[in-house]
Amino acid sequence: MTSISPSALLDLLDAAQKGDPARVLAHMAQDPSLAKQTRVNAVMAADFSRVDFDDNDLEEGNDEAPHEDYQQFDPRSIADFDTALIVAAKNGHAGCVSILFPHSDADARDADGITALMHAATLGHSDALAALVAASLIDAFDSFGRTALMLAAFGGHLDCLNALLAAGADANKTVKSSKLNQEAALFKAIQNGHLACVQALLPLSDPNAKGILNRTALMLAAQIGHVDCVRALLPVSDAKATNDFGQTALLLAAAYGHAECVQALLPMSDPAVIAKNTLNALMEASRLGFADCVRALAPVYDPNVANIYGRTALMLAADSGNLECVQILLPLSDAKAQDVNGATALMMAAEKGHEDIVRELLPASDPCAERRDRLTAAHLASQNNHWGPVALLAPFMAPAPRSGPRI
């Protein structure tokens, strides 16, 4: 290794961190090779009084401690692997970056494989990034599979993102392996709802590219609830595409309770799509109690459609105890419908002890209806000690049937 002055290198790193271009310039004039070194190199180059010093030496009468630079060095510290250029870029000191850049390896990486360009993009230091972008590997990946463009998009740093795109950054760049599965920059911008970055990336991105679990950018925006991003993506996206779970963007919006996204997606979506969990968007919203989504979906899709188990949206809402959803669905639904086991919405509410829902459903239901095991709503409430529903259903309660299926 080329002989270096540990104290000079440490002073250079300090100057880069504090943004002192005069000190940085002085060090580059005296020894430009320092620009390619890290604090680790300073420790290695230090003149140790005892290279093989260890705790046992003290017991043998050797009271010489290691060099002070060694005492300050923490091998677990990521910062100890930063070059002066990375330090300056991290701290947004563009003047120091410009001085260091000609003498540095622009693509040197820290302990996480992150370059100076990536650090500037992550933190939104656009001036520092502008000084680095021309001679850096613009589409390089860090140890986590992220590019500078992805990092700028995730942070919502539009100036950095535009500078990277102008320099030729690939908006569709991704890496996929057994350990890394990063999505393209468009997904990163959507994750935090950075609409301006989404709009900047869209003309250069594939909006229907599939990411994790085969989701599209539109699905991600709908799932998170960034309605402005949904509206920006809709004209260029396939709203009927499905992910690995058979869910469309509409289904995801309904499942996560994002009513504005549901309303935005409805004109270009198929509400009849059933996911692998056997539920459509209306059923999902009803089951989870997202009343605003139910209110948006119920008028445009028949709530009497049942899944493979014979369950309707009303049954799912009643079973889950979602009173407001029941109130929305009841005027549009057949309250007497039965699932494959013969259960009605009233029976499901009674069995779970949802007294307010039993009261709501009772006028439109058949309280004497029986399941395949011949139990009525009253019997189910009684068996589970739900005395409020029992009191409402008692006038219709017949003696409990003997065990055995109906013939």
Image: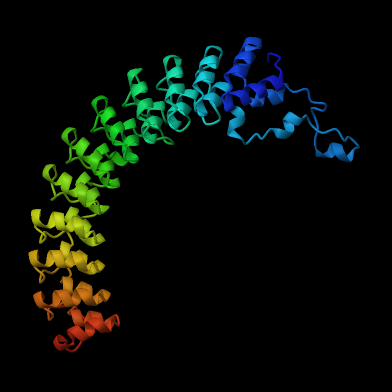
Q: Nearer the viewer, residue 102 or 107?
A: 102
Quadrant location of residue 360? bottom left
Residue 18, percent across and down? 58, 27
Left or right of 284? Residue 7 is: right
Q: Is residue 375 visible?
A: no
> Quadrant location of the N terminus?
top right
Q: How many marks?
A: 0
> Quadrant location of the C terminus?
bottom left
Quadrant location of residue 177? top left
Q: Nearer the viewer, residue 178 or 54?
A: 54
Residue 265, percent across and down? 17, 44
Instruction: Check the image and name the residue furthest to the top.
Output: 29
Q: Residue at x 53, y 12 (%)?
A: 102
Q: Is residue 178 visible?
A: yes
Q: Nearer the viewer, residue 156 or 401?
A: 156
Q: Residue at x 25, y 69 (%)?
A: 321
Left or right of 373? Residue 100 is: right
Quadrant location of residue 39? top right
Instruction: Check the image and name the residue furthest to the right.
Output: 61
Q: Residue at x 45, y 33 (%)?
A: 144
Q: Is residue 161 above or below residue 283?
A: above
Residue 56, percent across and down? 84, 39
Q: Is residue 403 above or below residue 322?
A: below
Name the colour scheme.
Answer: rainbow
